[in-house]
């Protein structure tokens, strides 16, 4: 699905988002999964930087709102963890690679696979079809849903946190 249906364009312009199933090929998805596995294999996060990720506003402000690790993650690849996987000192209670909730926020800038896919001709063509003028990639994330742990994945609209001028 390359967003060729006029109803999809209308939906995007009214609601600000689209779900495009099968936009990436199975090979592209495998490539991204393999890249994430390599990133996880070398993951090192000091205990004082380990942050539990939440989409609930109050928990977000408490856990991430004052965390330099979170607040300065816009131009880096950083790891955020599921609720309940860290003890009070930031030590993992389960295997660290199974503790991850998301990896963000600059995969598109630092990982070659994500950089290639993000800037691919099909993504550029999608931007043109959506009528975007001078689009800029401001963040990229890989969201996990680990089996048997973690909370409900509530909607998170990152646009609410992104500002630009002009």
Image: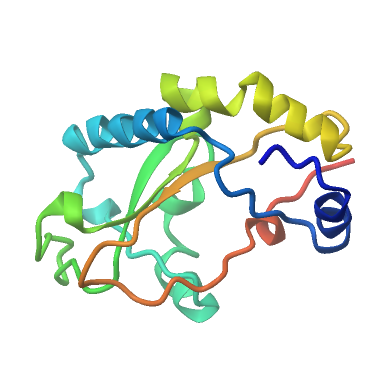
Judge from the rendering whether residue 161 lies leftward or rightward of residue 165; answer left or right. Answer: left
Which residue sits at x=48%, y=45%?
141
The answer to whether 152 is drawn above or below residue 78 in the figure is: below
Judge from the rendering whether residue 62 lies leftward or rightward of residue 37; answer left or right. Answer: right
Which residue sits at x=84%, y=35%?
129
Judge from the rendering whether residue 145 lies leftward or rightward of residue 87; answer left or right. Answer: right
Image quarter of residue 126: top right
Q: How many labels does the image show?
A: 0
Q: Nearer the viewer, residue 54 or 165?
A: 54
Image quarter of residue 76: top left
Q: Nearer the viewer, residue 36 or 29?
A: 29
Which residue sits at x=29%, y=65%?
82
The answer to whether 87 is drawn above or below residue 43 in the figure is: below
Q: Where is residue 64 in the image (x, y as percent from the top left)?
A: 44, 63
Q: Which of 135 and 19 is in front in this view?
A: 19
Query: What colour scheme has been applied to the protein in the rendered image?
Result: rainbow
Judge from the rendering whether residue 15 lies leftward or rightward of residue 149; answer left or right. Answer: right
Q: Inspect this view and state whether residue 36 appears.
A: yes
Q: Which of 39 and 90 is in front in this view?
A: 39
Which residue sits at x=54%, y=76%?
57
The answer to whether 162 is drawn above or below residue 138 in the figure is: below
Q: Inspect this view and state whether residue 135 appears.
A: no
Q: Quadrant of the N terminus?
A: top right
Q: Where is residue 142 in the image (x, y as percent from the top left)?
A: 42, 46
The answer to whether 150 is drawn above or below residue 91 in the figure is: below
Q: In which quarter of the image is the C terminus?
A: top right
Q: Where is residue 116 in the image (x, y as percent from the top left)?
A: 52, 19
Image quarter of residue 78: top left
Q: Residue furthest bottom?
A: 58
Q: Where is residue 49 in the image (x, y as percent from the top left)?
A: 29, 52
């Amino acid at each position: 699905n390359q967003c060729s249906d006029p109803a999809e364009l209308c939906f995007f312009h009214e609601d600000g988002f689209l779900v495009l199933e099968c936009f990436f090929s199975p090979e592209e998805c495998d490539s991204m999964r393999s890249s994430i596995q390599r990133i996880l294999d070398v993951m090192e996060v000091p205990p004082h930087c380990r942050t539990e990720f939440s989409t609930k506003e109050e928990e977000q402000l408490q856990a991430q709102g004052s965390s330099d690790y979170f607040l300065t993650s816009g131009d880096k690849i950083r790891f955020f963890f599921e609720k309940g996987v860290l003890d009070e000192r930031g030590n993992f209670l389960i295997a660290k690679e199974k503790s991850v909730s998301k990896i963000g926020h600059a995969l598109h800038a630092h990982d070659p696979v994500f950089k290639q896919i993000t800037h691919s001709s099909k993504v550029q063509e999608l931007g043109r079809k959506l009528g975007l003028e001078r689009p800029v990639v401001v963040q990229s994330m890989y969201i996990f849903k680990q089996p048997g742990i973690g909370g409900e994945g509530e909607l998170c609209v990152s646009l609410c946190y992104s500002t630009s001028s002009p």
